[in-house]
Image (cartoon, rainbow, N blue to C red):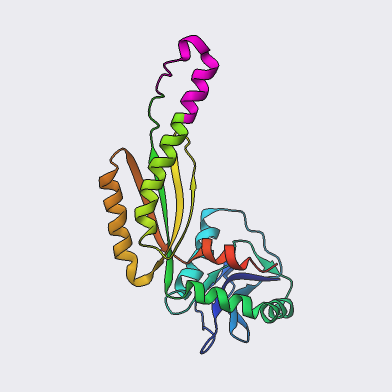
Amino acid sequence: MVYVYALVDARPAPPSPQGEGHGGAPLCVVSRGAVAAVCSHHDHLELPVEGDHLWRHERVAETLMEDHAVLPVRFGTTVADEDALAAMLHEREAEFCGAFERVRGRVEISVRVLWTPPEAEADPSAATTGPGRAYIYGRLAARNAAAALAESVHAGLAARAVEARYDVSATPRLLLSAAYLVERDGVSGFLEAVDEAAHRHPEVELLCTGPWPAHTFAQSTVGDPQ
């Protein structure tokens, strides 16, 4: 069994990863054409979704992205053997090379926006139309307020990013969950935009993490080895 951590642009040469993977197995490389897979060999492998395993997987991709365009692979991805992995790399080489160009020189920054929803405003006509209308009116007003606030926060951040993926949740705590693809030399400018958004909207709390390898944008384009 071969466990795959990340795909790496093998041009001009495949990487030479150092260190260990899961279970202390040495990292190795399977390369075909312009694409290399960083992986480890296992006779048997069970990986509960726990912190140590997740961080070990993540650290491999983070180390590689210092010097290469990297497509992170979903945690837990395995293939039967090196031949099957090599065949997949060959078959999808053009697809992966296009994805490398998408993420080259870029990183992912994640932002979560926390809030406390405002109290619902009373509908002036509720006295004559009943509690059902008042409930619907309140839900609609809260949804509209959430969307407007989320869009305002997101717009300033998206202006400093190459691409963005975001979702307006409008739960009692989480308002916005987003991932931004940012040029490496634009990270400081993006973080300034986060600070500016926090000052403009003191009613919310912004939680920013990264920079990371471009998980969201690599997987939405490429998919994972099967």
Q: Position of residue 121 (x, y in %)?
A: 39, 22
How many discs mark residues in the rendered view? 0
Position of 23 compared to 208: left or right?
right
Q: Position of residue 77 (x, y in %)?
A: 65, 65
Quadrant where the C terminus sits is bottom right
Spot the residue most to the bottom.
12
Rendered view: 112 above or below 60: above
Residue at 52 percent across and 19 percent down: it is 133
Rendered view: 47 above or below 116: below
| Magenta residue span | 121-140
Quadrant where the N terminus sits is bottom right
Question: Is 46 contained in the magenta span?
Answer: no
Residue at 58 percent across and 64 percent down: it is 219
Q: Residue 80 falls in which quadrant of the image?
A: bottom right
* Residue nearer the viewer, 32 or 1: 32
Q: Position of residue 138 (x, y in %)?
A: 46, 24
Secondary structure mostly seen in the magenta stretch: helix
Q: Residue 44 falls in which quadrant of the image?
A: bottom right
Rendered view: 180 above or below 100: above
Position of 111 compared to 80: left or right?
left
Q: Position of residue 24 (x, y in %)?
A: 57, 70
Q: Is residue 130 visible?
A: no
Residue at 31 percent across and 59 percent down: it is 191
Q: Is residue 168 visible?
A: yes
Position of 141 compared to 72: left or right?
left
* Residue nearer the viewer, 83 or 128: 128
Position of 97 compared to 124: left or right?
right
